Every structure is written in C-alpha cells, then in structure tokens.
Image (tube, rainbow, N blue to C red):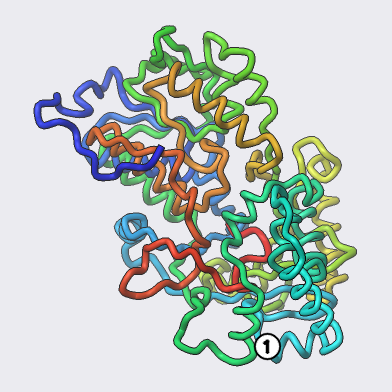
Amino acid sequence: MPETPDTPAPANAPARGADITAERPVVVLGGGPAGLTAAYLLAKQDKPVVVLESTDMLGGIARTEVRDGYRFDLGGHRFFTKVKEVDDLWHEIMKEEFLKRPRQSRIYWNDKFLEYPLQGMDVIRKLGPWELSLCMASYLWAQIKPKGREDTFEEWVSNRFGKRLYNHFFKTYTEKLWGVPTNEIRAEWAAQRIKGLSFFSAARAAFFGNKGNKIKSLISEFNYPRFGPGQMWEQMAKDIQEHGGDIRLNSPVTRLVTDGQGTVVRVETAGETLTPSYVISSLPLRTTVGIAEPEAPVEVRDAARGLRYREFLTVLLVIEDEDLFPDNWIYIHQPGVRVLRIQNFKSWSPYMVPEGSTDAAIGMEYFCFEGDELWETPDDQLVRMASAEIEKLHLARAAKVKFGFVARVHKAYPIYDEKYAERVATIRRWLESDLTNLTQVGRNGLHRYNNSDHSMLTAMRAVDNILLGTHHDIWSVNVESVYHEEVHDSENPYANDPETPAMNAPLASEH
C-alpha cells in the first residue's frame, strides 16, 4: 500500500482527534525515539497523552548512560537525515545544544586501519598490490558469471563485490553481528543497508577521482547533542510534560484488551488501567501479540514467536590518559576478538567526558542473544574481557583501564531471516483487522532496521493519521530509503537516490 502523505480528511468530516480526552488519552507504548516523538507532537496540539516506558530511562537503544561524569552513547547516533521534517524537529528540540561534529570511521583489519570510505593509495598500502589484484579478479568474475538467485545476504553481496571482498569485509563481521550464517540472512537487509553497490565505480573514484561529482560521498560532519543523544530525549520529555503530557517510567504494559470488534479498550500495567482513544506502540511485534486479550489467532501467535531479535551489550571503559583514535568509531574486522565495533566518545563531543579530563571514554560493542553465554557473563568478567581485547588489538593497555561497566539492550535489532517478511505480514493483517485504533511505529514496532530518523518519521506519520485524517502507510516508511549518511544533490537533498557509491556504503551496521 503506497504512502499518501497529502490525503486530507473530507471537508465535512468531524474534527479529527475530538475523541481524545483526558479520560481517553492517546496511550504511547515505549519511550524511545518513536514513542517520544508521537507524544511530543500530540502534546504540542494539547492532546492528552500518556507515555508508558517499561524501564527507568528514556531513549531505548539511543539513550545515554552516565557514570562518574563520563557519558556513553549506546550504539553511536549521528544526527544526520535526508528527511527535512525530522531535521527540523531535531533542531526545534535541541536549539543551540546541537554541535557540528566531524565524521570519521575506519576499518581495523589485519592489524591495520583502512580509511572509510576507501581511498586508492591507502588500499594499495594496506592490502598490497597482490591482494588487491586478487580482489579485483574476484570482482570481475562475479560480474561475468551468471548471477542466479539473490535470496540471501551472501548471494547479494558476493554478486556485487566478488567472493574475496565478501570474505574479507562482510562475512565474518556480519556473522558476528547477527549470530547466524550469512546464508540465513535475507537479501532485503543488504538491499536496505548497503544499497546500489558498484565496486568498479568506487574503485574508479578512489584511484582516479570523482569527475563531475557523479559519486556521492558520505557526509563529512553531522549534528550531535552536546551531552549525547539522551539530552534530546530528556528535553523532549520535559517539553511533553510542560504541554500537559504524562510520562511514566517503570511501567511495562501487561495487557492490551480489545472489545472483540477491533478496538483496544484497555491498556493495563502492573499498577493501573488506562482507557485509550488511540494506542501508538513501539513495542516489539512479538510483545504486542503476546499481551493481546483475547488472544490473537494461533497463526498470528506462531508468527510472533518466530520473529527473532539480536541483543546488544556495550562494555564501557574509562582508560587513563589515553586518546585512542580520532574516529567516532572503528569497525573491528580483526579475527581473534569478539568485539565488533569500538566507540571513542570524546570524538563525538568533548562534553562526553568531565571538563579537564585527559582520559578516554570508549564503548566496546558486542552482539549476542538473550540467555546465551555472552549475555549471561557477569559484568566484571565482561570488563576484564574487553580490557584484554583492547590490548590484543594494540589500541591501549589493559592496565590503563580505570573502571568499566556494562549496558545491555534487549531486542536491539530485528533479524531479517528467511521467514521474517511472511511473519510480519501475518501480524500486520491481524493488527489492521483486530486492533484498528493501534498503530505500530519504530524499529521493533515494525520489525524493520530503521535508524532514529526513520523511526521518528513513522511516529510523525502516525500522528498525522490520527489528527489530520491522512492515510499514511506506516509500514512503507524507509522501505526504499538509501543509506542515511550519503550526501545528495544540494538542490534535492531529500530525494531517494538509487545509486550509492560502492565501498562507501556501510560495511557494517550503522545505528
């Protein structure tokens, strides 16, 4: 179903949102970027709204952890978007608290830093002419051989880069990220995150320049809240409350009770019951199905149980008198360690460390499944492991680690496996027939690997549908979007561009 952003309500229609009252507010499930955006826009229009957040912090995976004056951005969040209305909202919230920050990321591979995006002479120095020749031969073979099916991540990437580059820069990293073989990850994830790859065009740009500026580069700078992304959610929450909205922490939803005719009539937590006019939910689809009463049909419950998620934990370290690297983060393609990516928070903002501190505040990122060995490892052991790995990578000495702690995020990444699209479609059909006053938004709410800007956009569209009577298809937001850190034509900066420079596209997960 295509999105119809400009479809107004009929001229003789009753006022939209007239049924939203203090007794029947809009109930927002989840206090992450999507949920808070919905609540903010509703509160600005003086609509009663209640946000129910299951934890004691706002922001979800985009929150900022604070310890002894050091600030840690879970996942790393560059505030750059091609969606102007989202960018306008960011600046409306942050005002002068947005900093312009330089963008830098590199790949750490074979004990070497590779510039990212790749640069010709740097590639020659680091890979060497022989290995580079083998990669080019592998690429050329991929171009002339029959393509065959492209159902999996492995097939999709190998057809565009060749097997050798796939094995060097995609296979190991992606399998550490997702915890499953790349032949079990659907091609849709690759198409969404690393769209329109062309090895030859990137190589030409790297070695011979970018004539006519035909190849768009990644952004060179981005906006960032002075004290990390959590500052945005804290300010947004304050604004919501000043407009009369209600935010309740430590309030996990236990039941969504429907009247059997397609309307959610009660939202229950452990301590209270709310009667909603509308429900905007960023809960994982599996959770929404699981708390519905009456129970969803068996095929919907089976579909929900089959959805898979990847958990995320960060070991946060303060390292004495060190400035490890200038990058915002580095991708770790090095064998022999479990860490996938390392953040340097001082490179995000100098205010992420206490004034006058010469220490480094870093985040060692690990991916796992809830209940597995890594997830269940005690925090002190994880801190020791991360300290040992930072030394094994020759980036710092373990003895210089002053202290560390661990932050865990449940259901951080929806997995695109072989059955996910079919399962999501089954759940969507049920939602649209049995919970007609409930709208799912956000990353887990739609089981789509959205960044914060697109998660917020889904909430903006949901509010439009409620208040303006538009008919946006929330599920279509970001279906055809290109990678969010590409620089586009200045005359049309928000258009979808079907071509992304090869090897400028992410070799790993961006957040």
Considering every residue shown, the one lying at the far left of the view is: 12
Locate residue 42: give its quadrant: top left
Q: State the count of labels.
A: 1
Which residue occupies 35% across, 32% down?
A: 246
Q: Nearer the viewer, residue 203 or 440?
A: 203
Residue 490, image x and y in percent? 34, 75
Q: Nearer the viewer, residue 349 or 29?
A: 29
- What residue would you read off at disc 1? 120
Which residue occupies 72% across, 80% down?
A: 114
Residue 85, image x and y in percent? 31, 55
Q: Nearer the viewer, residue 286 or 501?
A: 501
Residue 264, image x and y in percent? 41, 16
Where is 507 relative to 32, above or below? Answer: below
Which residue occupies 80% across, 46% down?
A: 180
Instruction: State which quarter of the image contains the C terminus.
Output: bottom right
Where is 41 relative to 252, above or below? Answer: below
Which residue occupies 31% across, 59% down?
A: 88
Given the image, on which type of amino acid does mark 1 rest? Gly
Q: Nearer the viewer, residue 2 or 381?
A: 2
Q: Secondary structure at mark 1?
A: helix
Where is 16 relative to 355, above or below? Answer: above
Where is 303 relative to 388, above or below? Answer: above
Q: Is residue 201 visible?
A: yes
**Left or right: 421 with respect to 314?**
left
Instruction: State which quarter of the image contains the N terminus.
Output: top left
